[in-house]
Amino acid sequence: MKGLLERWQTSFPGRLLKAYGEAKAGNYATGLAFRAFLSMFPLILGLLAVVGLVVRDPSMLERVQSVVLGVFPDDARSALGKTLAGASKHSGLLGVISILGLVWSGSRLFADLEFALGEMYGVEQRKFLRQLLMTMAMMGIFVVALVVSVILNGAAGLTPLATFLAPLVGALVMIFFMTIIYRVVPNRSFELKEVLKGAILAGVLIEIVTLAFPIYSRLMHGFSTYGAAFSLFFLLATWLLFVSQFILLGAVLNRMVAGEPRAAGVAEDPAAEKTDTRGSEAAERQRTAG
């Protein structure tokens, strides 16, 4: 038993988890999940408002909304869908407010994500204006990716294997999102091929936990005495915590495999210097231990 434990500790998965724990990445994931929870609804409304300015076909807008809600666990989709349906009845002024909310919430979320990834990589944050450029680029990328996801999901739905293809398409979309995040968000990062390992790990884990969440939801409904709204709050909060943990786990993997980041992110701040953080030191220790 002792020999088995020692082999596990010296294996790559064991060293990865050790680096993740030594980096205190779970603490950063908790803060990131809280920011994501606060930003979630303004981001969704803002994305739909931006797409609505370009796409006038109601059926296409419904498919876009379906793809956006498809990111969330099954039991959260109906409640979020009802909220969005209620908001769409006041689309005039609310559309303007939604776009402003998208800009503000998205900028704060990606700024926090840049900080958390920088702590894992050992990279300082950009200054305000360059950070704002990065967040605007990320939101533009996500709008384009959203439209592409609608096309992919529509194509998958035309096949008789739609039920089996849906999780695969979901995993591929998540891997794509993670690849963009790891490559673009940090001030200094890695080449595209170097972030794929972390993106695949994070994307697959996020898709698995999303598919498995109905089990957790049924347990929550069994124990909750505060109603559906309170259960939905805990459902989304827990799911976002898992997602944040997996994002940072993928970042630690990238740092362990590729070493010190040398590629420039979007709107790189050349004045920002390399810094030794707990996350970068933990990843480097486990990298050299192998």
Image (spheres, helix red, strand yellow):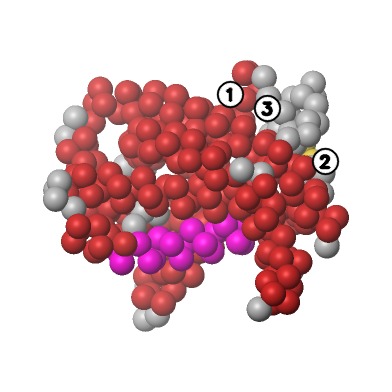
> Residue 256: x percent and y percent?
76, 53
Labelled pair 1, 3 in contact (Cβ < 8 Å): no
Residue furthest to the right in view is 288
List the single residue furthest toward the bottom: 160
* Residue 69 pos. (x, y %): 33, 52
Q: Is residue 187 visible in this depiction of the protein?
A: yes
Position of residue 122 relative to residue 165, above or below, is: above
Residue closer to the observer: 251 or 188: 251
Which label belongs to residue 132?
A: 1
In the rendering, at what x and y percent does residue 142 appear? 50, 43
Q: CA distance from mark 1 to mark 2?
A: 22 Å
Q: Which mark is residue 125?
A: 3
Task: Name above or below for residue 94 compared with residue 84.
Answer: above
Q: In the displayed structure, would residue 167 be above or below residue 110?
A: below
Tell me where residue 211 appears, x and y as whole percent. 39, 66
In what element is the residue under mark 2?
Answer: loop
- The residue range painted magenta reads 199-215
Q: Nearer the viewer, mark 1 or mark 2?
A: 2
- Nearer to us: label 1 or label 3: 3
Q: Between 213 and 186, which is closer to the camera in this rendering? A: 213
In the visual, does 110 lie left or right of 241?
Answer: right
Could you tell whether 39 is left or right of 275 in the image? left
Q: Is residue 93 above or below residue 228?
A: above
**Quadrant housing residue 88:** top left
Q: Quadrant of the C terminus?
A: bottom right
Earlier in the chain: of badge 1 and badge 3, it is 3
Residue nearest the observer in this picture, 141 or 182: 182
Labelled disc at residue 262? 2
Does residue 207 belong to the magenta stretch? Answer: yes
Q: Is residue 159 visible?
A: no
Question: Which amino acid type corresponds to the residue marked 2 in the rendered image?
Answer: Arg
Within-10-Å neighbours for mark 2: few <14, some 14–19, many 20+: few
